[in-house]
Image (tube, helix red, strand yellow):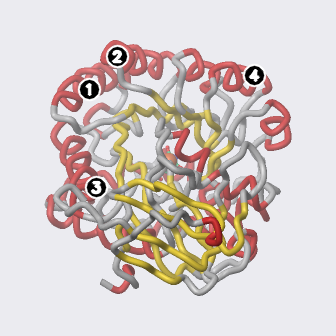
Amino acid sequence: MSNARKPARTLWRSARLATFAEESGWGLIDNGALVADGDRIVWLGREADLPATTLPRLEIDLGGALVTPGLIDPHTHLVYGGDRAAEFELRLTGATYEQIARAGGGIRSTVRATRAASDEALFQLAAQRARVLMAEGVTTIEIKSGYGLDQVHEARCLAVARRLGAELPWSVRTTSLGAHALPDEFAGRPDDYIDEVCSWLATQQQSRLVDAVDVFCDTIGFTPDQTRRVFDRARALGLPVKLHAEQLSNQEGARLAAEYGALSCDHLEYLSDEGIAAMRAAGTVAVLLPGAYYFIRETRLPPIQALREAGVPIAIATDHNPGSSPALSLPLMLNMACTLFRLTPEEAWRGVTVNAARALGLADRGRLLAGMRADLAIWNAEHPREIAYRFGHAPCVGSVFGGASRPAPLASQ
Ligand code: DI6
Ligand code: FE
């Protein structure tokens, strides 16, 4: 929170720490302790080794609870009006996600509801969703625009995302996704719309509304050429890019994004070998979205084994959005990444911690190490694999953001 006082030097003791400090392994420390000063971790290790000079102002006995890095959700569309429950019902009588989108429903119906909602209504709706995510340990989130689809409404949604970061105890990274769908006003003129999207970026940047730029590159989204135009503009402004790539078809979007040194490519069910090689060479993170895969009943799996063999870092996100993934539980995504995508529990955990940080270009979080941010999730569990194993109930009993305990239970506020 922007105007919070500096948290007092605090010692958390009687903890089991899962640090993810090394390139592999859980980095478990039994009978552990952690000290934070301000928003940073200053010491962690076995409690028996705690330096006598630590002198905390506050001491918290965790009674053996598990402490992990605060969870990072690196891909969400949290700000929007309305819902798509009726569309869900339609899909159950045979319509596909793609057919609904082509018939003017889908993303464009959420655009209508979002434009009609006030700033305050958009903020309150998103804040409710935020509290649900935070109650299960999320301390950093990426939020995309993409339901405004004109200059004014896109800026409004980005401003709401910024306000969520300023007023709630978590970090928000914003991504401009004007190229999410073609708004009705531009029907049949996608290239003109892309000109518009490109023209907004400089103002969004000057208003400090945007940390990265994204495009939905697919048959119901935008072409690789159109994607390139948005990325050229982003590059000229020095903004990093990411891409909704190969979700419903292979457009070789990942290869294109890698050319621009993309932070991440997301979805990736139809990713090719060439795409994997390009991502590896560029250091681009693969953000997998098991919620969307599940909810639109995709049958093609992302090429997990090939990504793993290539050493492409894998992150996991909720993709929270009203159409393809109305999920608000990152621990549930851990379970789904394991059951649906066959990730190991450790890979899934790295996906919502260290690799999720990397997908957002953040080097100061995602691991428990001295010097990193003191963003913690506290669990009634003996081992992090238990949180990937359970589903429908995540035993999160507390969380810390920037060295300060967050009020619990956040979801009921
Ligand atoms: N792919 C998705 O899964 C979401 N956006 C995208 O480009 C879906 C967004 C929606 O249906 O509202
Ligand atoms: Fe998405």
Assess disc 2: are there few (<14), some (14-19) or many (≥20) residues with their C-alpha within 10 Å of its C-alpha.
Answer: some
Q: CA distance from mark 1 to mark 2?
A: 8 Å
The answer to whether mark 2 and mark 3 are in CB contact below 8 A is no
Which mark sits nearer the N-terminus, 1 or 4?
A: 1
Helix, strand or loop at mark 1: helix
Q: Assess whether mark 3 and mark 4 are in contact (beta carbons under 8 angstroms).
A: no
Q: Earlier in the sequence, mark 3 or mark 1?
A: 3
Amino acid type, label 4: Ala
Q: Earlier in the sequence, mark 1 or mark 2?
A: 1
What type is the residue that disc 2 sits on? Arg
Circle 1 residue:
201
Residue that sits furthest to the front in the current view: 52
Residues at discs 1 and 4 in contact (Cβ within 8 Å): no
What amino acid is labelled 3 in the image?
Gly
| Image mark for residue 233 | 2
Q: Residues within 10 Å of mark 4 (few under 14, many from 20)?
A: some
Q: Quadrant of the C terminus?
A: bottom left
Observer-side mark, 4 or 3, equals 3
Q: Which one is earlier in the sequence, the residue at label 4 or at label 3?
A: 3
Q: Does the residue at mark 1 contact the one at mark 2 (Cβ under 8 Å)?
A: yes
Q: Is residue 296 left or right of residue 304?
A: left
Q: Answer whether residue 394 is visible to the viewer in this image.
A: no
Q: CA distance from mark 3 to mark 1?
A: 20 Å
- Residue 165 is marked as 3
**Foreground tag (3 vs 1):** 3
Q: Nearer the viewer, mark 4 or mark 2?
A: 4
Q: Amino acid at mark 1?
A: Leu
User: Could you tell me how far apart the alpha carbons at marks 4 and 2 are, in whole angstroms?
Assistant: 25 Å
